[in-house]
Each structure stands twice: as C-alpha cells, then as structure tokens.
Image (cartoon, coloured by chain):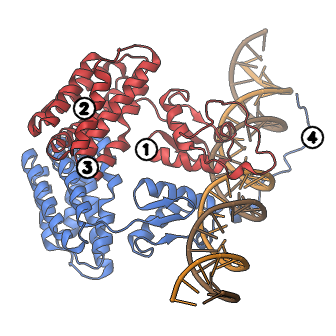
Chain colours: A red, B blue, C orange, D brown
Amino acid sequence: MVKSMSSPIAQPPTAGGMSSRMVAVDVYGYLAAAILRNEIPPASRVNINAVAVSLGVSATPVREALARLESDGLVTQLHLKGYRTTELLNQREIRELWQFRMLIEPYSAGNAATLATPAQLEALQHEIDSFASAPVGSDFDSYQDFSAHDARLHALILAASGNDVITRAFERTHCHLHAFRLAYTGSAGRATVDEHAAIVDHIVSRDTAGAGAAMMTHLAHSRDRLLPLAKQG
Amino acid sequence: MVKSMSSPIAQPPTAGGMSSRMVAVDVYGYLAAAILRNEIPPASRVNINAVAVSLGVSATPVREALARLESDGLVTQLHLKGYRTTELLNQREIRELWQFRMLIEPYSAGNAATLATPAQLEALQHEIDSFASAPVGSDFDSYQDFSAHDARLHALILAASGNDVITRAFERTHCHLHAFRLAYTGSAGRATVDEHAAIVDHIVSRDTAGAGAAMMTHLAHSRDRLLPLAKQG
DNA sequence: TCGGATCATATGCTATATGATTTTTCAATC
DNA sequence: GATTGAAAAATCATATAGCATATGATCCGA
C-alpha cells in the first residue's frame, strides 16, 4: 500500500490540475486489505464509484483492481450488478483448500530443506525468532500481526523450495486471507508457533523427510483449528 | 417527494439501443485465443487501442480483459509501457510446471477413480472414443483439435476428482495453452492417445492406484516430449 | 557516427453518457 | 388499515470519448 489511505474522508479533488499524475494509489492493495480486515463484509456489494471517490481516483483503476481480485477469488462479478465480496469459506471449501496445501506444501518444505540458500535459512530462522518470544495477544491487531507472520513463514518456505509455478499457485489461493476472514476475532496460538519452529528446525538441519512430515502435521492441525469456525457445507 | 405525475410511458427505449448495445464481445476469450494461436507472438506488445478498434469496443473492456490475462500469466504489464505477451516457457519453467502437475494430477486421477459419477465416467469414455480412431494429422488445425481434446480430458479428470480448489489451481496454470504455444507446429501423438486411454481405463475400473500411476507416467512422457522444443533456462 | 532536441504514438486516467437495476412512492385491493 | 403490486425516481454499472503525460523513434547538428 502506498500512501494516503488512512483517511477515508474527502480528498481535495486535485485542484489546479497538477496532482493528477502524482501518485498511483494501490487500489488493489487497498481493496485486498479492506476485505481482509472485514471492512467490506463477506458477500456485500462493492460500490465502484464509492471506492473511487474515497481513494481520490476514477472508476477505471478500480475496475482494473476488481478484475484482478476476481481472479484471486476475493470478489465475484455479476453482469450489470457489479462486484460482491465472496462468502466466507465453508467447511467443505476449507477441506478442499487444505487438501491442496497438503499436496504442495509438504513437498515444498522438503525441497526447501534440500535447496534453501544460507540467506533463506537465516530468513526463516529470523521469522521464527521474531515470534518465538512475542506475546500472544488476542486482540485484533495482535491476531493480524500473527496472521501476517504465518503468511510470511509459509511464503518463505515456498520461495526456498525453488519452484516459482508452485509458489504462485499457492499465493493465489490466498489461504491466509481466507483463514483470517474466518478467524479474525481469534487469537494466536502457541501451538502454531511451536509447529512452525519444528518445521524450520528440520529445514535448517537439511532434514527433507522431517520437514515434509512436520509441515503435514502442521497443516492437519491448522485445518482442524479452523474447521469449527466455518459453516457446514 | 418528487411527484411528477405526467411523463407518460412515452419513452420506450425502442430503437437506438441496438447499435452500440449489441453484444458484449468476449474480449478476454478473443485475446486468449489470439495468444494461443500465436497471432500475437510471444513477448510482443499488445496495443490496447488497436484491439479495441478491431473488436469494435472501447479501451475499457480491453483493459479489463488484460488485467485478467495478467493474473493468468499470459501477459505482463510494465508501467507506462503497456502490456506484452509473456515469453514461451523455457525448459526450467516446463520442469516446474510439470512438477506441479505431478503433485496434483495423479492424486486427482486417483480420486476420480474413487469418486466419479457414472455420468462423469461416460464423459471420460466418450472423450477417449472420439479420438481413439481419429486420424492423427500434423497440420495446424489437427494439432489444435488434438490440443483441445487433451485439455478437455485433463479437465474432465480434475472435475471428477471433486476438489474445486485444485481444479481451479490447475486451470489457472493454462498448461495446455503454454504447451500449444511451444508445439503448435507439432503433430498429435499416438502415444499420448494411448496414455490417455490407459488413464481412463483405470478410472472407469475404479482402480485408484492404477489411475494415479498412469497419470504420473503420462505426465513424465508429455514433459519429455515437450522439453526439446523449449529453450534452455 | 554520436548526442541531443523534436515529434508521433500509446498509456493511464478523467469526465460523461447510457441503460439496467434497485429503491421508493403511491394507489388499489383485500 | 394493512398489504400487495405497479410505476416513477434514484442509483449504479458499463461503456465511450478525450486529455495530459510518458515513451521511443526520428531528425538535425556537431
């Protein structure tokens, strides 16, 4: 996100005409964050003009961002009825998404154990250390921090596994975003932190099979932690 | 509060609406097909205005389609330089893409053997039959038909496996489109037809392990057939 | 031949028009 | 009097045209 989005109120409409070329507001990032934080609740309409006005841009860049968000599965477009945010995942969808993760993430964790560069190992260890001793709060901001940490760690592991196709396929699931939308009132779990540490320990010690197994265990647990929060489906 | 009683019906939209409101041209489909057929060569610029004029629409729907195509990895956007089609896959990218397929398609083929409905089994068998005895030509149109058959068969298997997340992740790789761009001068292979038939035989006979193994074999072979056509990387 | 100025072209955006949809209003009926 | 249904108004999504700016190529002079 770039700038000037903490004030949802009126921006002066580009007086004089000098400022129209100044800043490219990251409409995509703004909308993704707004959906993440449930500022735009699930299954609610996204008013293109309202977004455009609140960001001080016109409709065209908003439409472009929404087209991308639809590819990401965060909004859906109905002809002549505009865009709506998607529903929260139900239990069936969680099972399907986690099954997908179980196919690619243990494999990727194993590859990371084999292929990670020293710098990548250090980044993984740093991510673990930064949360190993952190307080585990239960307020919104704490949970958001924790969710971001979770997302970063998994992304680091994928990146270290050396397969860009798989990494992008994983990113496009936006699994952490969907999980956050379900659990944004929840709290960070010490169990998750421990499971993350175990995965990274195996990767750092170049234990391919152990890393894959630890990731599989972690995914099964995280799925089971999430399922009770979702509707049946 | 407005009361305006007059203004009788006398405003039927009638004519006028016909010309400009005719049909929503499928810009996305047009561009995807154009890239597929190499009418827009790899790594070449896509002139938004030219596309708009040739399709008889304005720039806005073209921009929206290009935003979606970028999410699909078929074009890339450079700021103030517009959109370019992506390069052909190189050997490293083929290996990465096929590795991804090897993670999800054998699993999905196995699930299809377990879960496919009778209608889905029939659709699979029909797809096989329609090409089992077909002539295997080497001209452009024949190869295009064959590629479409290949894409349909894999899509049917994914659909029968009962996991929409995995199905969408697979679709978004556009692996058949990338393969076609590399091999569009090639010819359909009898070997591929036979491998397809073997996979479907296992699925129809509810042989989960056999279906997965047959799919894995098929993927390895198709990868090895494709690699010589790509640049090193 | 090389460097710099000039100009044509394309991009990204804004402003606006058009028509579909949704909401509100209001009268008629039960 | 409450409720239903239709008509009008308002709202909103989509599309179009046009403008300001950045880019890249051409041309000129040294």
Residue A151, x across and y down, in percent = 35, 33
Q: Is residue B109 above or below residue B17?
A: above
Residue pointed to by mark 2:
A125
Residue pointed to by mark 4:
B6
Q: Chain letter of disc 1?
A: A
Residue B25, x across and y down, in percent = 56, 63
Kindly indicate whether the residues beneath marks 4 and 2 are on one polypeptide chain: no
- Foreground disc of the pair 4, 2: 2
Q: State the SS at label 3.
A: helix
Q: State the SS at label 1.
A: loop
Closer-to-camera residue (B180/A136): A136
Residue pointed to by mark 3:
B158
- Foreground disc of the pair 1, 4: 1
Kindly indicate whether the residues beneath marks 1 and 4 are on one polypeptide chain: no
- Amino acid carrying label 3: it is Leu
* Circle 1 Cα neighbour tier, 10 Å, few/some/many (<14 / 14–19 / ≥20): some
Q: Which mark is residue A72?
A: 1
* Residue positioned 63% across, 65% down in the render: B57
- Amino acid carrying label 4: it is Ser
